[in-house]
Structure formats: C-alpha cells, structure tokens
Image (cartoon, coloured by chain):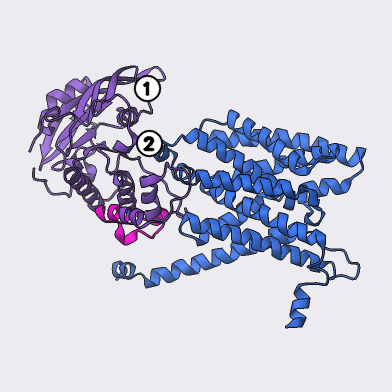
Amino acid sequence: MKRALTSGATPVLQVEELTVVLAGRVVLDKVSFALTRGSVTGLIGPNGAGKTTLLRAILGFERPRSGAVRHLGIAKRATARIGYVPQKVAFDPDLPLRARDLVGLGLDGSHLGFALPSRRRRTLIEAALEAVGASGFADKRVGRLSGGEQQRVLIAHAVIRHPELLLLDEPLANLDLRSEREIVDLVAGLARERKIAALVSTHDVNPLLGAMDNVIYLARGRAASGGVDEVITTEVLSSLYGRHVDVLRVHGRFVVSAASGDLLVDASTTSQAEPREQ
Amino acid sequence: MSALFHALFARGLFSNPAVHTAAIVGALAAISASVAGVFTVMRGQSFAGHALGDLGAAGGSAAALLGISPLVGFVGIGAVAAVAMSTLGSHGRRDRDVATGVVLGAGLGVTGLLLYLDTTHSSTTGAAVSVMFGSMFAVAPSTLPAVVAATGFLALCLGALYRPLLLSSVMSELAAVQGVRVALVEASFLGVLVVAVALSALTVGAVLATALLIGPAATAIRLARSPGTAILVAAAIGVGSTWMAIILAYDSYYWSASHSGWPVSFFVVSLIFVAYLVAELLSSVGSRLATHRDPSVSRTLS
C-alpha cells in the first residue's frame, strides 16, 4: 500500500522549504515534505547529510533561516505531541534507573516534584512497557540492558504520552540483524495501531524496506521524498548527489554505488537477510 | 552486654553538648551532601563537587580572618566559583572540566594566601586545620539555625526539581524535548551543590568535603537500582558513617593515656570508604549469583 506524502487530512507534520544554516554552511537546503497519521517514513542519507539537523529543526532546537515546520498546521512545537528517540545513548551500567523509571519519566518527567505512586500511573507505565515487549526487563537498570532492549525502553519512553509524531534518530545503529528487524517491526506496528506518523532516520535504506510507506532521501542538504520506488532510483539520487550514481536492486535490496566505486549505502551488513515482501 | 555498651559509648557521650551539636549538624550535613551527591554522580559532576569543596577552603579561611561564620565563607566562595565555572565552561563536558580546573587552580592560590595570613598574622594554626579537615566537636551551636535553614533550602529545591533534574541528568536532550528548561535546572542544581558542599565542608572540612558528597552516593548507586532507593541508601550511609564516627572519635579520647583524641573527619571518611568497599564486594557477589540464577542466561550458555 502506497500513500502519497500529502494525501488525507491535515498532515501531522509539514516541512516547507526548510533551510538551516549552521556555522555558515547550508546544512538543509529548501527541504519540503509532509507526514501523515499511521505512516512510517524513512529518513535516509549518508553520514553528514543533515538527518540529525532535520530532526533537531523539527524539535525546535535549530532555527531555520527560512521555511517553516508546522505541527498539525501550527507553527509552534507541542511537546506532548512529539515522541523522540535520541541517537545512541550511552547509559552508565550503574545508573540507578530501571527501565520502568525511564518510561515513567516519559510520562511526567517535566513535572515538578516527585511522582506520587498511583495505580493509574503504574498501569500506564506497565501498558507502555507491554506495548514494546519490555515487561520482562522492566526492573533491570537501563544501563545493563542490550542495545535492542534499550531501544525498546526508549521507544516506550517516547510513546507513553500517545504522541502523534514519533522521531527516531538512527535507532538501528549498533544493533544486530535480528534486533534491527524487531525494532523496525515494532515501530511500524505502533505507527499503524496508534495512528502515529513515524520518522526513522538511518544511513541504510534496506532495513526499512517493507515496513516503510515513504522515504525522504537526504544528500548534500537537499531532499527527495515520495514512495521508495520513486525516490531510490538512479535518476533521483544522481540529481541529489550531483554526480552519477547507480542504484542496483539485488535480491530485493538496494545498493547505491558511485562511479568511483565507493558504496554510498553500506550493504555489507545486509547480505544474509532474505528479500522482504511489500 | 553492659560492658559492650560502655566500651562503645564512652562516659559522658550522651551528656556532652559538643557531641549533641556535632550529631545534629553532622546528620543534616550528611543528608544534604549524600542526597545532592547522588545527582552529582549521576550527572558526572564529581569533579565540580570536588573543586567546590577545595575552593571552600578560601572562603573558610577568609571567614576565620574576618571572624565570621565559616558557613558564610563556604557558601560565598562556592557561589562565586560556581558562577565562574558555569560562565567559563559552557561548551560541553570537556570544556566544563577544563574551566573547573582553571577556577580551582586560581582559587587554591587565594586559599594559600589566606591560610598564610591566618597562620602568621593571627597565629591560629588551629583555624587552618579545621577549615581544611574539619573539627566537628568545635562547631559552634550558634551555626545550628543556619545549618537547619540550608538543609531545608536543599530539601525544597531537590524536592521541587526532582523529576526534571532526574530526566536532564539521565539525558538532557530527552528533557529538552519534553519541555524541561534544562539550563535553568542545571543552574539551580549548581546552587544546590554549592550549599551541600558548604555544609559538608563545615563538618568534615573543605578538603574532605568530596568524601561526604561522593562516597555515600557512589556506594548507594552500586547497591540500588532505582533513583529513590539510591537517595535513601546514600542518606543512610552518610548519617550512619557520621554518627558512628562521632562515637569513635569520642571514644578515641580514652584510647591512649595521653588523652589525645583523633579527629571525627578521619573516622567519617574511613567509614565511608569501608562502606564503599563492602558495597563493591556485595554487588560483585550479587551479580555472580544473579548470573547463576537467571535461567535465560544458562539457556544461552548451554
């Protein structure tokens, strides 16, 4: 099922002609796209393409030079409506914080005072842990969980307040193939069930194939967006990179290669996975 | 039984007014320092805490020269140092450490001068020693109201900031996304840290203040899995070590024929260190036991 980026009701997120300049360098150059409810969008691009800057601009941490970021048509950021999973967090193994404590902070971490123990609060936390399959390690310290388990807990932290927009910054970094698959399925499931617009950044398009509805490809600060087959093509990517690149599809997986021979999308970690069905 | 009681609690322990003051001031300072210490350790600000303690010596020795309460000196110099450290080191953790180190160096130079003046002009070697290493039995009862007020201030601040502070200590980016004003929370915590270190310096001395700040907190973090438990355990270790140290220091007066008692600070710091070693042992034994018990681990091993 393929959705046009702008179809349906008011988009959850609308980015219009967004230009961000950092230290004199144009990091994002007139980037435009929209995200709709219940969809998964991959934010793909090589390191340094501006993926994190784009996410930070959506969160309101970077001031655009021009253009706008609209949440449900409003130019102001509404914190309760955005769930955010940051790039690889290094938790100290001794940090006295159980998985359930971190999820609880997602619920009311910005409030003053202590969280009074209540049945309602506990039920909400248990439900969020259950939704990401983290009930089994809810009482372990977050710093002692595996990378995949930490991602699940961070996702529970992000979705406990039922946001309309979920941003994930490189959630698949440093995960093994199985955890990678599990996290992708989890995010796709949450997006569809809860009508969340999920934006997942990753440098490799392949882990998201089959789970994502749309793709935004970033290179040199410029973006192309649309369906996977419309964007991941020799023509579109060559135009983005400003030089000829070949897009090959091998056993259902993409390999993007420049004329000089360097792989622009690292396919080395994905050789054993079977092709995914749409 | 009675013999043991008298061996531990020497004659006059419970009727001595200096012991009373030490027990109350010591407990309040230990609670303040240990609880603030848990956040300090979680935030990776141990070095800042240590520097604030060392710099307190400048404030303490200035207070001795001027004849005012040492607590005023500790808090005053701490506030100046905290502002200097956060103004200079606002670009990440490494920058923060460098700025802390630079301010610490400059402050210790001033301390050297003030301590020199203390010992030469007013010929009070005792003042220098008690500023740096504390003398709990010499804490003036008149400082008690200020100590109670400072502890109340800390309890109020940490109670109000608890969740935003915890979240920004775990990860400031997550806190900012949830609408926490991270810079404000960080500045407030630095204020809390200044007061906690000042209370700690008042009891165990400026140089040993870190031990009371970091020791019980580090021990609690080894033992406790949740932040609330860590705070309670840290406070218990802090107060326990302080009270036990007061008893031992009082006893030590009778240990030698010359009746030269040992300082309380020595016992506080030693007991905190012992508690840390025990916790280290317990947590390594505990994790080994957990590995044996956890069926999922043995399954993957077989």
Which amino acid lies under the numbered mark 2 shown in the image of this protein?
Answer: Val
- Inspect the magenta stretch and tell me whether residue A132 lies in it: yes
Taking A175 as reference, is A215 left or right?
left
Numbered tag placed on residue B177 in the rendering: 2
Which label sits in the foreground, 2 or 1? Answer: 2
Which amino acid lies under the numbered mark 1 shown in the image of this protein?
Answer: Arg
Number of residue marks: 2
Alpha carbon of mark 2 to alpha carbon of mark 1: how far? 15 Å
Which residue is depicted at the point 11% across and 46% down?
A: A275
Of the 4 image quadrants, the one containing the N terminus of chain B is bottom right
| Badge 1 element | loop
Chain shown in blue: B
Front-most of A214 and A113? A113
Which residue is depicted at the point 55% across and 33% down?
A: B95
Q: Are marks 2 and 1 on the same chain?
A: no
Query: x and y percent of residue A75 in the render?
Result: 30, 24
Which residue is depicted at the point 50% across and 65% down?
A: B283
| Badge 2 element | helix
Residue A220 in view (yes/no): no
Which hue is chain A drawn in? Answer: purple
Front-most of B110 and B79? B79
Residue B217, placed above or below residue A276:
below
- Look at the image and give the residue range highlighted in magenta: A126-146
Tags 2 and 1 touching, CB below 8 Å: no
Of the 4 image quadrants, the one containing the C terminus of chain B is bottom left
Label 2 is found on which chain of the structure?
B
Where is residue B192, by image quadrant? top right
Residue B32, placed above or below residue B191:
below
Residue at numbered disc 1: A63
Query: x and y percent of residue A98 in the render?
Result: 41, 56
Taking B182 as reference, is A122 left or right?
left
